[in-house]
Every structure is written in C-alpha cells, then in structure tokens.
Amino acid sequence: MRAFSLVLRDPTHVVRRDDVISFVGADSSGSFGILAGHERFLTSLRLGLARFRSAADDGVTYLALASGLLSFEDNTATICTRHFFLDRDRDRIAQALEGEIQREEADFREMHALARNLEREMLRRLWELGRTGSKPGL
C-alpha cells in the first residue's frame, strides 16, 4: 500500500511518521478517513480519539487530542493541537485523554473564578472612586 506522512504538533514537541497508510478522525460532520493521495483537505478535529495504521506496525496506533486542526496537502497530514497522546493501547490512551479533560476543566474553573474576583475588585474600586470623587492616580 502507498503511504503518506503524518506530522503531529503541539507547543512542546513534534512527531513525524512517514509510513502511515490510513488515518481515521472525527470533525463536526462525523468520522472520516484519509489514505495516501487524498485531495487537499482542511478540518477542525473534535476532542476525542483518532487512529492510524502504519506500514511498519501491525495494528492501530491511537491518537488522543483535545481538538485540533488537520490539514492534508502534498501527501502529508499535519495536525496542530494543544496536547496529544499516542499509544497502541486504547484503554490507556482513553484514560490519558480523560485526565487531560479533567485538568482543562479544573483550569477553566480556576480562570473563571479569578476573572470573577478581578471583576468584583474593579467594580469595588470604581465605586470607591465615584463615592469619594477622587481621580485615579497615574
């Protein structure tokens, strides 16, 4: 079978495989597959598991990602994402993805709480400035 290249990028590292024979992922329209020679393609991947097969390996390698952008051009699929995990074991990678989702949700809740506190403090300061009639110092 003909192969294509798969390049995975996140802020900390890049992984390149030049022996990929098929890729299956999902976007907002559902699941899709890519084989070597596919036409130019661009889509936004949704959170979850994708998978690919390579010519050198028996079986499937799973890719967990928290969404990302996939482009296919010149027989190379490039995925840019915030985080990704690769593993041959589906259960292990599903656990890694679940852990990442929980961390992102906790970070979101913390940022939301910090934004509420900042907004509350700004409103309090504006109220104090309006009450005293003083102008903010530079």
Image (cartoon, rainbow, N blue to C red):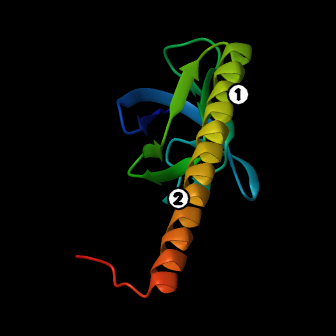
The amino acid type of the residue labelled 1 equals: Glu
Sequence order check: which comes first, mark 1 or mark 2? 2
- The local crowd at label 2, few if under 14, some if 14 to 19, many if 20 or more residues have their Cα within 10 Å, is few
Q: Is residue 125 left or right of residue 74?
A: right
Please report the residue visible at 54 percent of the width from the left and 22 percent of the height from the top. 86
Q: Is residue 123 above or below residue 48?
A: below
The amino acid type of the residue labelled 2 equals: Phe
| Image coordinates for residue 64, horizontal then vertical, percent | 62, 31
Q: Residue furthest left?
A: 138
| Image coordinates for residue 19, horizontal then vertical, percent | 44, 26
Q: Quadrant of the C terminus?
A: bottom left
- Residue 51 in which image quadrant: top right
Please report the residue visible at 59 percent of the width from the left and 64 percent of the height from the top. 120
Which disc, if any, is residue 41? 2
- Residue 25 in which image quadrant: top right
Q: Secondary structure at mark 1?
A: helix
Which disc, if any, is residue 76? none
Residue 24 visible in image: no
Please report the residue visible at 67 percent of the width from the left and 12 percent of the height from the top. 89
Q: Nearer the viewer, residue 37 or 134?
A: 134
Residue denoted by label 1 = 98
Q: Secondary structure at mark 2?
A: strand
Q: Nearer the viewer, residue 99 or 110?
A: 110
